[in-house]
Amino acid sequence: ILHDNQLFYIFLVIGGVFILVGFFASRIVAKDISKPLRKLEDFTRQIAAKNFKAPIYIENQDEIGRLAHSMNNMQADLKRADEEEKMFLQSISHDLKTPVMVIMSHADAILDDMFEDNPKKAAQIIKDESINLNKKIKKLLYFNTLAYSLDNQSKKENIELADLIENTVSRLKMTKGYLAWSCQAESVTIFADYEKITVAIENILDNAIRYAKSRIDVSLEKKENRAYIEIFNDGKHIDPDEMDKIFENMHKDRTGNFGLGLAISKKIIEFYGGQIKAENRENGVCFSILL
């Protein structure tokens, strides 16, 4: 019995030692794990507050280290997106401010009787700038809700693309009566939202109208069971350095104006699995769309 008691106490002491060692070891391990996790928690709070300072540095090469690396990449992406958003709002504000200033200045001139002989001229300028301002605001609102609209409010149907293009051309060709138009469209049917595709084509045509010197050529044909559209204008060539940027929502055109039309068109076309590109031709610029 005495021998059994001694064994019991020996095992009890050994067990107690193991428990103490395990306790302190677990504390050390927990501290080693919790320290970088607390750093990651603080780093997350800074990101949430848009406080994009230096990236976090954690020596661990395990899952925590890989998590820190991913969070650094996320911080860089969010910082870039935040800077682009600020530039976007700044450019939009500047772009909207110009027509407002023109409207206000001509309205003041009318009130000060500076257009006694021909007030209609000032009224026409105010009307034109109001139309221009209205178009910019509509595009801004449309662009802001486009992603949600494409995912949740698209009404897909079979569209006779030739009819859509011909109708759009007939509506826009009168905006600048001196331009010569050519429209050749084969019968091609696509499955998409009629309103969204109309907006995409209309924006590209509007861009062509803005820069064309004397003519615009539009064509539609079927290539490998897909719709292939070309919209050509005989305006100045696009700077090769700008070619990849003209579809960005931050891009300003040659006149310094901030436009969203091409960015909207690209989003819509790519949503339906299509492609769009611009290229300089011998006598002008051509936009090619594959749907």
Image (cartoon, rainbow, N blue to C red):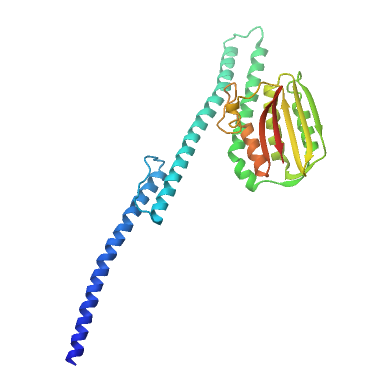
Residue 8, relative to residue 16: is it above or below? below
| Image x and y of residue 275, in percent | 67, 39
Residue 67, relative to residue 51: is it above or below? below
Q: Is residue 153 visible?
A: yes
Q: Is residue 258 visible?
A: no
Residue in view at x 60 percent, y 40 percent: 145
Residue 65 as seen in the image, left or right of residue 262: left
Residue in view at x 37 percent, y 50 percent: 40
| Image x and y of residue 120, in percent | 67, 13
| Image x and y of residue 89, in percent | 51, 32
Is 202 or 18 nearer to us in this picture? 18
Residue 155 as seen in the image, left or right of residue 16: right
Is 75 or 275 nearer to us in this picture? 275
Number of numbered discs on residues? 0
Is 174 or 186 nearer to us in this picture? 186
Residue most toward the bottom?
1
Residue 2, relative to residue 126: is it above or below? below
| Image x and y of residue 86, in percent | 48, 33
Could you say which quadrant of the image residue 289 lies in?
top right
Q: Could you tell me which quadrant the N terminus lies in?
A: bottom left
